[in-house]
Structures are given as C-alpha cells and as structure tokens.
Amino acid sequence: MLKPRIIFFILFLALAILYTGGCRRAGRWLVKEDMPEHADAIVLLMGSFPDRVLQAVDLYKDGKSDRLLIVEESMGPFSTLESRGADIISNTEQARNSVIALGIPAESITILPGEARDTKTEAIAISNYVAGNVALDTLLLVSSPSHMRRASMIFKAAFRDSETPIYIGCSPSAYSSFNADRWWKDKEGIQTVLSEFVKIGSFVVFERRKLGVN
C-alpha cells in the first residue's frame, strides 16, 4: 500500500502538470518581485550564485542597501576532501570574492555561520542574526527568478514569530536564463517549474509549521 506522502506527491504532481500545462502564467507566478525603497540588508541566497551575485552587486550600487548578508553554505562531501589536504574554495568564499571584485567593500559583507543546506536553514540563520540586531527590519532577498516565490514564503514563515515585524523584499536576478513567460518551450524550463510547484506544496503541507524563530 502506498504511503500517504507518496500518494500526496503523485496527486500533487498530476495536478501541477494539468495546471501548468493549461496555465502559461505559472512561471510568472513563481517570479515574485517586491522591491522596498531601501533595505537594511541584502540577503544573497546561495545556490546558482553567479546570476545572484550580479543582481546583489547591482542592488548595492543602486543604493538599495549598504550591507550584504550571506549564510555560509554547507560543503557537504567537499569537507572530506578538505580534511585530507585538498585546497577547496567553497561556494560561499567564491561568492564573497566575486562581490568584492565587483565593487562591494569587504566591510559591507557579513558571512553568517550556519552550514546551510537549503533555503530553510539560511532563513533560520538570518532570523537568528536579525533577532540580535534590532536595527534590521527590512531585508531584500536575492535569488534566481524561479526560486523567488518559495524563498519569500520560507523567510516569512521563519520570521512569523519575530517580536518586531520584518519586511521581506524580493529581487529576482535579471541575469538568470529562466524565461518565466515561455518556460514551457524547453525541457529545463518545464522541469524547473514543476519542481518548484512540488517543493512549494511540500513546504506548505509538511514544513511551514515547523519553521520559526529559534
């Protein structure tokens, strides 16, 4: 007998296929954009970081914020290579070096420890940091366009118990190859959209209630 979660994912995937097949605006819905006039900090989410780094640098130079926050990404199996003497440059280090090379001063960048494995652990690390910095009440998330809606949902859930209301802005990278208006035209776009809908469904049903300020 199939487990309830497996049944849920099968049904959700089937509904997602029917919905996205008949609704070409599904890709556009994922690309949430909510730009505050000014943010206390830009939050650079790790992942596909080249396009995100370029967006963060543009925002900084446009005066949207004078502070950049990055949660240290988990190195996973690469840490084993490093422990054996291999010289490994982590994605976090590469992102930091890139933004400095593109003009953001090193003193404007804060790397938060967290061994982040996903957006949820990044959100928790950021919420814990903000809890100790009462002057921060407006954040501007930078991520890939298709990931932006889910990232916003995760961060808002992480801050829902915050004593001070936190505004979560969103700035999807303009440098991404994702085409929100023609996503169904190529295999990669279809896979991206369907994957995001499944992940959003999983977050809403199973994970959101467990996420909050520690």
Image (cartoon, helix red, strand yellow):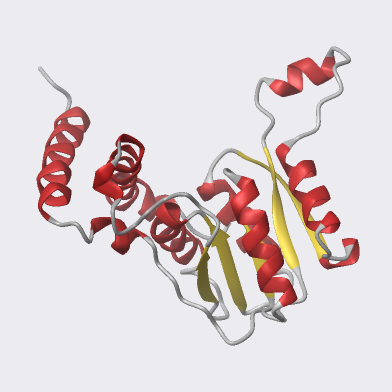
The residue depicted at 69 percent of the width and 30 percent of the height is 75
Outermost residue toward the top in this view: 84
Q: What quarter of the picture does the C terminus occupy?
A: bottom right
Locate residue 204, reporting x and y percent.
Answer: 30, 53
The residue depicted at 82 percent of the width and 65 percent of the height is 104
Relative to 34, say whether 25 is above or below: above
- In this view of the protein, can residue 171 be seen by the observer? yes
Outermost residue toward the bottom in this view: 37
Relative to 51, say whether 39 is above or below: below
Tag count? 0
- In this view of the protein, can residue 46 be seen by the observer? no
Relative to 130, say whether 99 is above or below: above
Q: Tell whether 94 sits left or right of 3.
A: right
The residue depicted at 56 percent of the width and 77 percent of the height is 163
Locate residue 64, reporting x and y percent.
Answer: 67, 79
Q: Quadrant of residue 100?
A: bottom right
Q: Tell whether 136 sits left or right of 22.
A: right
Locate residue 191, reporting x and y percent.
Answer: 31, 37
Q: Nearer the viewer, residue 214 or 158?
A: 158
Q: What quarter of the picture does the N terminus occupy?
A: top left
Relative to 129, say whether 77 is above or below: above
Q: Tell whether 165 sits left or right of 114.
A: left
The residue depicted at 74 percent of the width and 48 percent of the height is 95
Locate residue 151, reporting x and y percent.
Answer: 46, 57
